Image: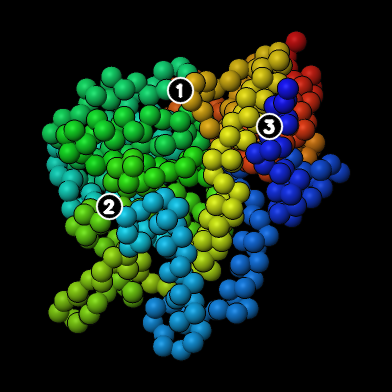
Amino acid sequence: MKTNTDILKEIIDIQKIRKDFPILDSIINGRPLVYFDNAATSQKPWSVIKAIEHYYTDLNSNVHRGVHHLSQQATNAFEASRKKIADFINAAYDHEVIFTKGTTEGINLVAHSYGKKFVQQGDTIIISAMEHHSNIVPWQLLCEDRKATLKIIPINEKGELLLDAFKAMLDEKVKLVSVTYVSNSLGSINPVREIIELAHRKNIPVLLDAAQAVQHIPIDVQELDVDFLAFSGHKMYGPTGIGVLYGKQKWLNQMPPYQGGGEMIKSVSFEATTYNELPFKFEAGTPNIEAAICLGAAVDYINETGLENIQHYEQELLEYATGKLSEIDGIKFIGTSDNKASLVSFIIENVHPYDVGVILDQLGIAVRTGHHCTQPLMDFYGIPGTVRASFAFYNTRAEIDTLVEGVRKAVSMLAVK
């Protein structure tokens, strides 16, 4: 009979994968690096690192505005990356993919442009109680500006949305629903299909924050029928400073530009300006060309490995970590939804999360501690923060064993007897 370890080896060739990520060979405080801060940012494979070098040594030029060879080559690579990303999420059109700085800018773009066009005094925006600050503050700013109301979908102790309460909020005043696909603090995978279906029954568009989903879960925007989807490159093995906003063509065409400048125009005079077509209407100025091209390389790497293989392997890691950590006295998991991505968030009785993180760092183990930019969520649980260990497909069971040993050491050193 095959063991779970045998099955994992068939899904992911972990030793081959780990060789693709040079930073995993690092020694931290005299110990091999154990990197469990993937929800904050993922590490980069050689193919992405080499793509950065290739751009600057062979392609470096501005895009879209040059007739010379380098400009055309850079433009071709830039737009080829857009197409890869459109195919990756199954967008109907390449021009529904807008390059941004990251998830935060994508959400701000929608809040500004969609809000300016469609949100009026007395209207309502709906978000959830588990949102990252980047999916809270832009809507607060919009509601303050438009004299609209922000409503919050409540959660239960397990970290699951209360859909009955959500249904009760949906009325003619609601102009947009914006929720996270996967909670960055809890790991909860939200029932986004049901959320979208319920909202669409009343012709309400939905934005999904997919920053913690797109690298773990296959996403088909047409099958989901989602109106907007935002995610970041650096959490999916790509560079920092690049992200994507997907938007349905029907919405993007109606929304005014987010910023003014070069590229987003067709013609300019001192009397009037005519805006460019999609996607350029929302890409003012010189873009982060290198990062956009390299995000395409990251998508290639994910596709070569297989996102379904990644998802299955990471779920095995999650189950293993949850079982092993649960054996530690005094541990309490924050976020126990039945449907989770590969992330565990926990506290230790009478121990501050920061102190656990410091000890783990001395052992070469990288985790994230604090409120994870979800302060209202921490207030709901009545805690200052958690220790968060987030897993990627280059992590191993042996590394989880090292984490468990480190947490036990932290408990023995810090717990009040």
Q: Which label sits on residue 7? A: 3
Q: Earlier in the sequence, mark 3 or mark 1?
A: 3
Q: Residue shown at 80%/36% (left/top)? A: 363
Q: Residue shown at 77%/33% (left/top)? A: 398
- The local crowd at label 1, few if under 14, some if 14 to 19, many if 20 or more residues have their Cα within 10 Å, is many
Amino acid bearing label 2: Lys
Left or right: residue 254 versus residue 289 is left
Q: Position of residue 417 (x, y in %)?
A: 75, 10
Give the CA distance from mark 3 to mark 1. 30 Å
Q: Position of residue 53 (x, y in %)?
A: 64, 71
Left or right: residue 240 versus residue 228 is right
Nearer mark to the viewer, of 3 and 1: 3
Q: Quadrant of the N terminus?
A: top right
Q: Earlier in the sequence, mark 2 or mark 1?
A: 1
Determine which residue is flagged by label 2. Answer: 248
Q: Position of residue 180 (x, y in %)?
A: 40, 37
Amino acid bearing label 1: Gly
Quarter holding residue 144: top left
| In the foreground, 107 or 189 | 189
Query: Taking 261 as reference, is 99 above or below it?
Result: above
Q: Residue shown at 78%/40% (left/top)? A: 364
- The local crowd at label 3, few if under 14, some if 14 to 19, many if 20 or more residues have their Cα within 10 Å, is few
> What element does badge 1 sit on?
loop
Residue at far right of view: 30
Q: Earlier in the sequence, mark 3 or mark 2?
A: 3
Nearer mark to the viewer, of 3 and 2: 3
